[in-house]
Amino acid sequence: MKHDVWVLVLAPGDKDYSDFCFDTGIIGTGWASVDGYHHVLAKSEQEIGQGYDLAYSGEDWADNDNRNKAIYALNKIANEIKTGDKVLIRKGNKKLLAVGEVTGDYKFKKNWVGRDLSHIRDVRYTAIAREQNLFDIMVKHLGKQFSMGHTIYYFGEIDHSVWGGFVEGCRDKLMETL
C-alpha cells in the first residue's frame, strides 16, 4: 500500500498560521473571495480561473502570477488532496514543522481567520515539532527534500511501511527533547 503525500506552507498572505492550524487540526489556503462551492469544488482549472477573475478583477495585485498561484492552490486543496492523504508542513526549504493525515473533505469558510484560511481540510497531526525541525528525519526516511515553489504541491507516493518508519522516527526525535 502506498500513500499520496503533499507539502504545504501554512503562511498564506504574510502571516504564519502554523500553530493555529496545528491547534485546530486543519490545513488551508487563502483566496477567500473565490467562492469555494461555486467556483472551486469539482471545477476545472479554467472554471477556478473564472472565479478568480470574477472575485479579483480590478485589483492592482491580481496579475497573472497571482492568478496562477491561486488556481493551482485552490485546485490542489479542493480537488486533488483526498481524505487519507498524508501532509508535510514546511517552513522554508529546510524545516519540517509537522506531519499529518487528511481526515476530512474540503470546506469553504469565506470570512474565517481574517480571510487567509478560507479553503480548508481537516487534518490529524501525528507529529508536531513547532520549535524543532524534523527535516533530517524526513530526508533519512523518505529520501527526498522539499522543492521551491508552490504553497501546496504533490511530494510523491510513499510506501506504507516507509511512512510508518518515518512517523515513528519523528516521534522519537520529539521525545528526545522532553
Image: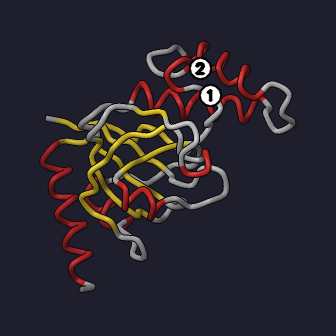
The residue that appears at 65% across and 20% down in the rendered structure is 51
**Picture layout, residue 74 above or below residue 144:** above
Q: Amino acid at mark 1?
A: Val
Label 1 sits on a secondary structure element that is loop
Q: Which residue is mark 2?
A: 48
Toward the viewer: 111 or 61? Answer: 111
Toward the viewer: 5 or 114? Answer: 114
Crowding at mark 1 (Cα within 10 Å: few <14, some 14-19, many 20+): many
For residue 163, side relative to residue 60 (left or right): left
**Picture layout, residue 171 above or below residue 125:** below
For residue 158, what is the image quadrant? top left
Q: Which residue is mark 1?
A: 34
Q: Amino acid at mark 2?
A: Ile
Where is residue 102? Give x, y as percent: 30, 42
Quadrant occupied by the C terminus? bottom left
The residue that appears at 27% across and 34% down in the rendered structure is 83
For residue 84, side relative to residue 120 (left or right): left
Do the numbered discs 1 and 2 sit on residues whose CB atoms are within 8 Å?
Answer: yes
The tally of labels here is: 2
